Image (cartoon, grey):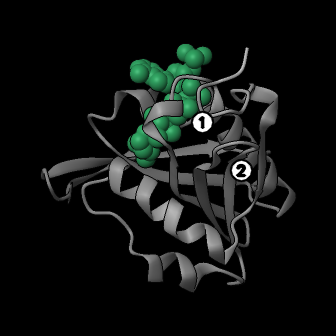
Amino acid sequence: MEAVSGRTPATPGDVQIRPLRHEDIETVVAIEREAFTTPWQPDTFAGLLDRDGVELLVLADAGDGVIGYAVLWCILEQGELANIAVTPGRRGQGLGARLLGHVMDVARRRGVEKLFLEVRASNAPALAMYASFGFEQVGRRRAYYDHPKEDALVLVAALT
Ligand SMILES: CC(C)(COP(=O)(O)OP(=O)(O)OC[C@H]1O[C@@H](n2cnc3c(N)ncnc32)[C@H](O)[C@@H]1OP(=O)(O)O)[C@@H](O)C(=O)NCCC(=O)NCCS
């Protein structure tokens, strides 16, 4: 059946993971603003493009364009998942898990042995996703986040 917009709705197979390009930044920042109360600005993403040790990846839907993204930075055998989000209308479809699995593969190929991240203590969906990928809590940063003020949990996964 044809969608009202005139095109067939995308199936999961229509979503690919590819490097972020400069022209994706506007869409990525729009997703970022819906996901976080202190969002990164366009300049932050632009400044990370082509930076050594940084991987910027997007989930690109064949019909809808960019629907998610992740930012990984790697320094020798340590990596940090600095950012990951999926647009609200496409959450709960396995896309965040697919992107995270891909990021972990990329980090492993770059020689990362430990992948760190910080997450709001109340962010149940993200915490459940990270736990299912073997992340464990190794620290807590008190009152790390603003709007609202909240602790960050520091998680790590061993990639070897
Ligand atoms: C975290 C986020 C990226 C997950 O993306 P997603 O595409 O919705 O996740 P998936 O559908 O792939 O689900 C992966 C796992 O996450 C967990 N999860 C996802 N949504 C959940 C929910 N509403 N409640 C509890 N757990 C949830 C589950 O463990 C799920 O695995 P399962 O389906 O086998 O149970 C997404 O919720 C998001 O963009 N949130 C806003 C940004 C954010 O908080 N990023 C993390 C910052 S540290």
Q: According to the image, label 2 marks what residue?
A: 103
Q: Position of residue 50 (x, y in %)?
A: 72, 83
Please name whichever residue, 90 or 69, is drawn nearer the observer in this view of the structure: 90
Please name whichever residue, 53 or 134, is drawn nearer the observer in this view of the structure: 53
Residue 6 visible within the image? yes
Q: Residue at x 65, y 64 (%)?
A: 78
Label 1 C-beta lies within 8 Å of the nearest ligand 1 atom: yes
Q: Position of residue 98 (x, y in %)?
A: 70, 35
Per the rendering, the mark at residue 78 is: none
Label 2 C-beta lies within 8 Å of the nearest ligand 1 atom: no
Mark 2, secondary structure of its residue: helix
Q: Position of residue 142 (x, y in %)?
A: 19, 53
Rendered position, 116 above or below 73: above
Image mark count:
2
Q: Amino acid at mark 2?
A: Val
Quadrant position of the C terminus in the picture: top right
Rendered position, 5 above or below 142: above
Left or right: residue 108 versus residue 90 is: right
Q: Position of residue 34 (x, y in %)?
A: 34, 49
Q: Amino acid at mark 1?
A: Gly
Quadrant position of the N terminus in the picture: top right
Q: According to the image, label 1 marks what residue?
A: 96
